[in-house]
Image: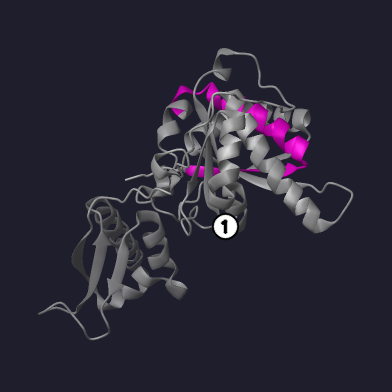
């Protein structure tokens, strides 16, 4: 199941951000925002022994969680950060994170002019309509008001179970923060979005996220294991093994990343007794095994359907 990465914020909260969220009931409702960062940037956000992320949680009052190392958003090599709390806490927490990342990139560039950078938010498909608005009116007003570029990707149907879209913000730090404030306030008006705060990685139910508890027992990194793993072996016809593997192993890597299961395929000629089916061994929690089986079956069935058309 999910283990989460969180730090207990201190009671004294300092909020020194520039854009103020809209004064409305939604400003105090629990909400969250998810966005993508490179593995290197994730390390920078965590800091040595979790020091940076602990500081950011104390200053903002928000809870900050990360997907584990090598657990990426489908189709990318980026990890997911989720910041949760009230709108004000979330925007403050996000401001602290982005300010640090922008500053580090700016120092590397060595330029006096702040460049326009890109930030990818992860938003449920069901909530994107609110950002777009009737005839695109809402997103147009957000672009005009923030001066940031805002682009919503189409839903990627190549990844089984994925119900999230990427909302790409391009602009300077200030432009991105204005856009985030507008988008988050809008999302927080959506009760369904707010209720999803406890399932940040719904497209990857097999994922663990990292848990830092520097103020907990011993102040050490905590890793909450999933339930005990078992192994199940299924048969896949020799002619369809390529579909499970995918070009360059892409399919099997995708299934492994999204479910958390480990998958091993028998060598050529090593069949299940009395068949020409190769052995596909799936190791993991019961839930991870079921998800992996479903994804493998879907890969094979889709090819069989195309063949009969």
Quarter in which the C terminus is drawn = bottom left
Principal secondary structure, stretch drawn in magenta: helix
Residue 233, compared with residue 179, is above or below; it is: below
What residue did someone put label 1 on? 39
Magenta segment: does it hold 168? yes
Which residues make up the magenta segment?
A: 164-192
Residue 49, compared with residue 181, is above or below; it is: below
Q: Nearer the viewer, residue 63 or 134?
A: 63
Magenta segment: does it hold 51? no
Residue at horizontal 45%, vertical 73%? 247
In the shown orientation, is residue 204 left or right of residue 180?
A: left
At which x and y percent is residue 74? 48, 55
Residue 199, compared with residue 104, is above or below; it is: above
At which x and y percent is residue 101? 69, 48
Q: Is residue 219 visible?
A: yes
Secondary element under disc 1, as helix, strand or loop, is helix
Residue at horizontal 29%, vertical 77%? 239
At which x and y percent is residue 180? 66, 33
Q: Nearer the viewer, residue 295 or 263?
A: 263
């Amino acid at each position: 199941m999910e283990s989460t990465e969180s730090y207990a914020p201190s009671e004294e909260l300092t909020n020194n951000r520039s854009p103020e969220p809209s004064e409305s009931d939604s400003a105090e409702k629990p909400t969250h925002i998810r966005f993508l960062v490179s593995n290197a940037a994730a390390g920078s956000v965590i800091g040595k022994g979790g020091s940076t992320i602990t500081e950011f949680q104390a200053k903002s009052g928000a809870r900050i969680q990360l997907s584990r190392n090598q657990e990426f958003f489908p189709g990318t090599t980026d990890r997911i950060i989720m910041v949760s709390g009230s709108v004000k806490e979330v925007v403050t927490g996000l401001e602290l994170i982005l300010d640090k990342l922008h500053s580090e990139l700016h120092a590397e560039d060595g330029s006096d002019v702040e460049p326009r950078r890109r930030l990818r938010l992860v938003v449920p498909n069901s909530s994107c309509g609110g950002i777009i608005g009737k005839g695109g009116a809402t997103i147009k007003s957000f672009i005009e008001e923030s001066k940031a570029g805002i682009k919503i990707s189409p839903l990627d149907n190549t990844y089984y179970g994925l119900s999230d879209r990427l909302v790409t913000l391009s602009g300077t730090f200030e432009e991105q923060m204005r856009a985030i404030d507008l988008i988050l306030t809008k999302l927080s008006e959506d009760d369904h979005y707010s209720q999803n705060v406890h399932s940040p990685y719904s497209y990857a139910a097999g994922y663990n996220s990292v848990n830092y508890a520097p103020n907990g027992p011993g102040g050490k990194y905590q890793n909450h294991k999933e339930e005990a793993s078992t192994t199940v072996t299924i048969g896949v016809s020799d002619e369809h093994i390529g579909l499970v593997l995918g070009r360059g192993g892409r399919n099997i890597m995708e299934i492994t990343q999204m479910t958390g299961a480990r998958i091993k395929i028998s060598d050529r000629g090593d069949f299940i007794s009395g068949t020409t089916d190769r052995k596909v061994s799936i190791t993991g929690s019961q839930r991870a095994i079921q998800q992996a089986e479903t994804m493998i079956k879907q890969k094979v069935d889709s090819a069989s359907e195309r063949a009969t058309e």
